[in-house]
Image (cartoon, helix red, strand yellow):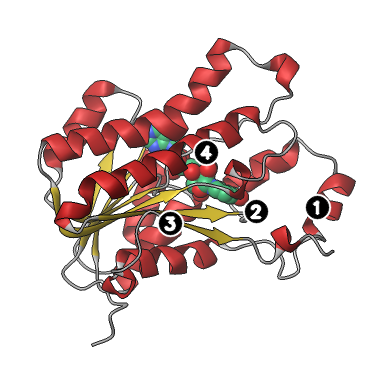
């Protein structure tokens, strides 16, 4: 059988009520895996759930709420994979930054992932040979104007992923990041509102292969979750349609 399949794997997907997480959950099920999906918005999470093949579970939780996080962890079975897709983008020029805004971005893009990993580990709910996937961004290594909070939070999660790789290798548990450039999702549409049409059109022209789709990210997540990537840990896979080549 192909090593890319996900049969007999149970995988937690956060941020599954929208965008990248929603597609990753769907693709995991198409590759034979089972998912536990989580997100805050019940209606959108239910709509993800309705489109999944096989036996799956759905748990609504605001992961910034300690009680809801703990209730989620209590309900989880032992996992063969986790895909951390919950995230937030808040572009602000430096003069508008405040402690409150730093906290909003870092709590969602860093603390949630770290606290989830800590609690799951304490409850011994990660199986041997599991694969952990974090969704970073090219902004971590290639910051942009207005990206102080987002770039910083993604750089922090990339470092954390490497620490997970180092601490968990004795159980053959792997940890990797996917760092996409622009992907068409509701988050992209939110970022779109902060830029003029001309600026955005100019930006999109710099992608030799066009901007990304949620399927592009999901296919990479499937590879990292599957045994086909069993020799890969502590890495960051960039998905950018050639944007960082900078030749256009
Ligand atoms: N789109 C891009 O261009 C792009 C590029 C690079 C990296 N990324 C990264 O990819 C990941 C997914 O992005 P996306 O574009 O799919 O975003 P999205 O469509 O806005 O989805 C964000 C998801 O995060 C969940 N979430 C946010 N705060 C949460 C909280 N406190 N508790 C639980 N869930 C929470 C949302 O849940 P609810 O909707 O239920 O509230 C939603 O499911 C993010 O980490 C993002 O930084 C995106």
The front one of 53 and 229 is 229
Residue 201 x, y percent position in the rendering: 84, 54
Q: Residues within 10 Å of mark 4 (few under 14, many from 20)?
A: many
| Residue under label 1 | 203
- Badge 1 vs badge 2, beta-carbon distance below 8 Å: yes
> Which of label 2 and label 4 is nearer to you?
4
Q: Residue at x 70, y 58 (%)?
A: 244
Q: Secondary structure at mark 1?
A: helix
**Marks 2 and 4 close (CB-CB < 8 Å):** no
Is ligand 1 less than 8 Å from the beta carbon at label 2?
A: yes
| SS for dot 4 | helix
Q: Nearer the viewer, residue 34 or 94?
A: 94
- What percent of the width, then of the height, locates residue 152? 56, 32
Callout 1 crowding tier (Cα within 10 Å): few <14, some 14–19, many ≥20: few
Is residue 122 shown left or right of residue 145? Answer: left
**Viewer can see residue 181:** yes
- Image disc number at residue 52: none
Q: CA distance from mark 4 to mark 1?
A: 22 Å
Q: Residue at x 12, y 51 (%)?
A: 78
* Camera sees residue 52: no
* Residue 191 image-quadrant placement: top right
Spatial separation of the CA atoms under disc 1 and disc 2: 10 Å
Q: State the residue position of label 3.
A: 235
Quadrant where the N terminus is found in the figure: bottom left
- Specify the farthest residue to the bottom: 1
Marks 4 and 3 sit apart, C-alpha to C-alpha, by 13 Å
Q: Secondary structure at mark 2?
A: loop
Instruction: Give the residue number, with chain letter if any, for mark 2.
Output: 182
Examine the image and state in which quarter residue 245 appears. Answer: bottom right
The residue singled out by tag 4 in the image is 155
């Amino acid at each position: 059988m192909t090593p890319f399949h996900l049969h007999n794997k149970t995988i937690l997907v956060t941020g599954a009520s929208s965008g990248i997480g929603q597609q990753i959950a769907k693709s995991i099920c198409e590759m034979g895996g089972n998912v536990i999906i989580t997100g805050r918005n019940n209606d959108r999470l239910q709509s993800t759930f309705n489109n999944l093949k096989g036996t799956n579970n759905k748990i609504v939780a605001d992961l910034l709420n300690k009680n809801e996080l703990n209730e989620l962890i209590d309900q989880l079975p032992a996992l063969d994979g986790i895909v951390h897709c919950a995230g937030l983008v808040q572009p602000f020029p430096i003069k508008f930054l405040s402690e409150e805004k730093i906290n909003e971005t870092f709590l969602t893009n860093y603390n949630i992932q770290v606290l989830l990993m800590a609690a799951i580990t304490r409850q011994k709910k990660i199986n041997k040979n599991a694969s952990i996937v974090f969704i970073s961004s090219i902004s971590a290594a290639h910051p942009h104007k207005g990206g102080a909070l987002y770039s910083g939070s993604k750089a922090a999660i990339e470092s954390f992923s490497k620490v997970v790789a180092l601490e968990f290798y004795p159980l053959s548990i792997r940890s990797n990041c996917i760092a996409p450039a622009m992907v068409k999702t509701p988050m992209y549409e939110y970022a779109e509102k902060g830029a003029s049409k001309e600026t955005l059109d100019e930006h999109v022209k710099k992608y030799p292969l066009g901007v990304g789709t949620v399927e592009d990210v999901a296919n990479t997540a499937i590879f990292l979750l599957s045994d086909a990537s069993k020799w890969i840990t502590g890495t960051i896979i960039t998905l950018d349609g050639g944007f960082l080549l900078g030749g256009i």
